[in-house]
Amino acid sequence: MSDMTTQSSSSPEPRPHFHAANHGNLPPVSNQLLGCEDLDVYYGAFRAVTEVDLEFNRNEITALIGPSGCGKSTLLRSLNRMNDLIDGARVEGTVNFMGQNIYAKGVDPIEVRRRIGMVFQKPNPFPKSIYDNIAYGPRVTGMSVSSMDDLVEESLTKAALWSEVKDKLKAPAFGLSGGQQQRMCIARTIAVKPEVILMDEPCSALDPIATMRIEDLMHELREDFTIVIVTHNMQQAARVADRTAFFTAHAEETTGNRTGVLVEFDRTAEIFENPKDKRTEDYISGRFG
Amino acid sequence: MKADNRTSESDIRPLKLGGNAERAPRPLIFLGLLWLSLLVAFSVLVTLLVTILVEGLPVLSSDLVTEYPSSRPEEAGARPAILGSVWVIITTAVLTLPLGIAAAVHLEEFADKHNWLNRLIELNVQNLAAVPSIIYGLLALGFLAMLQVDNKNIVIGGALALSLLILPVVIMATREGLRAVPREIRDASLALGATPWQTVWRQVLPASVPSIATGSILALSRALGEAAPLLVLGALVYITFDPNGLLSGYTTLPIQIFNWTGRPQEGFHQLAAATSVLLLIVLLLMNALAIYIRNAYQKRW
């Protein structure tokens, strides 16, 4: 544990290639907040993800990378039961959040989604004002809020958007640029004070500058939240993530059906500099995917 | 050095001049037929409009709106029919809209789409929209008879028939509107911890209000022009009082027109034409409102 304290106090300033935290000696697995064990996700008869074991640590950023169709997004959506909403989606195995299987009987998916928030690939503001977008979550979840104005300001500030929008809170959110919309969606997510934020390729619809701003923001959000990000962009994983999980699509021998499997999961520096698996090495060196 | 990738002299093929595939005989004939079809449809409409305008305009006066029907055409007006139409349409709207919108929300947002019963209902809603309107009149007649209502020419009876008639249209229009709300909006709301019900009530329904309003207004304007189901219910009567309640006797504009057209006197034909002009104006206004709402609230996602 003494190891941990030195870790969390290390400053994130020098960021030459990898996140500073990656160069320290993280304990193998500790401080787990969310994790899945032996997780299979099905769409009807199709098994999209097979036997995944992962742990996500508190105040860390974990990246899920891999080629298209390897089930990263499917896995992500099963971590807060967003997959429940898709016709025919089914989960086997467990997803543990603070020691509780979120798929156990009696668990309310609404509470799961409130505590494990999600940011989507395409910015998806509501057709309302910026203010109402942020206030929506706290309102519908019945959060006791002493001052909604303060909460809106705090959320937008944490999402590094306050200075840009503070004079036009009542303006429609559609008027913002794509990058601003995405940061507003992040602000909207943190307004309900979740413990975990899942991000499904949050920058894939954005230009490089907007992407950079979101990545910077993620480093700040790490102080308060646990983040899991799916990304197509390996450099992005290398830049932001403490740990990285590499997935690939694997054809089952008997049926030939393709299914997503976890190949390797380690500290990001290990994955990129010293991959244990040949498939990981091929992927990160650009030989496939 | 060779200009390896550049186009050589012999590769240059200038665009041919003189030919125009759009001016070939076949496309021209086809275009001509299209114009002809348009002309036929248009001239029928123009003839109709000109005829009723020529016949009706001279007698289109405030008397038409304020006077009661009379056996003498120069004294007759359509006041009870106008008020009857207003009563019936408002009652129809009150009966249909909550029911139709609720049914559509259930079918689109909550019903299990793989369940055979739900699929049967869906299919039948579409079929019901194609049922001739007089059938709904008979249905309402049977229903009132079952309730042992003797006088079937009452506002609520007519509204019931018209509700049945436009309910499928309202359901389908609402479903279209709900379906047009992108999945991302639902996802965003649910991911924030909103319940499916809150998501529908606070995001999906408000976002589809324009298309629901448009569809409903068009459906109501169809109901306003209907005569057949109301004729079955006995609305073809001589009414010389203002309808004043759901159980009041009534007649409506289309039926007043029908009534006057059947009279031998020329004066009544003129009144029928004038009333048609009035009905047309109301219908055009309603459709214009529907188009206005559709354009004004067009969503960009």
Image: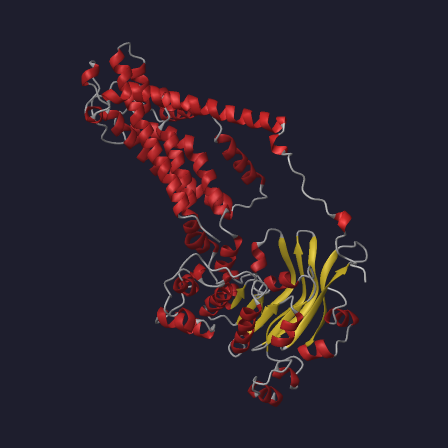
Seen at 74% across and 57% down, the residue is: A258
Q: Is residue A279 left or right of residue A72?
A: right
Tell me if residue B149 can be seen: no
Q: Position of residue B42 (x, y in %)?
A: 44, 25
Seen at 76% across and 50% down, the residue is: B9
Q: Quadrant of residue B68?
A: top left
Vertical placement of residue B142 versus B264, above or below? below
Q: Quadrant of residue A52?
A: bottom right
Q: Is residue B68 left or right of residue B229?
A: left
Vertical placement of residue B257 versus A77, above or below? above
Residue nearer the viewer, B10 or A94: B10
Q: Quadrant of residue A248?
A: bottom right
Q: Quadrant of the C terminus of chain A?
A: bottom right
Residue nearer the viewer, B185 or A236: A236
Q: Position of residue A30 (x, y in %)?
A: 62, 80
Q: Quadrant of the N terminus of chain A?
A: bottom right
Q: Is residue B76 left or right of residue A99?
A: left
Task: Please tell me how many numbered marks the rendered image carries.
Answer: 0
Tell me if residue A204 can be seen: yes
Give the colour scheme shown: secondary structure
| Extreme residue toward the top, this view | B264
Seen at 40% across and 34% down, the residue is: B219
Q: Position of residue B184 (x, y in %)?
A: 52, 56
Residue nearer the viewer, B4 or A214: B4
Q: Position of residue A28 (x, y in %)?
A: 67, 81
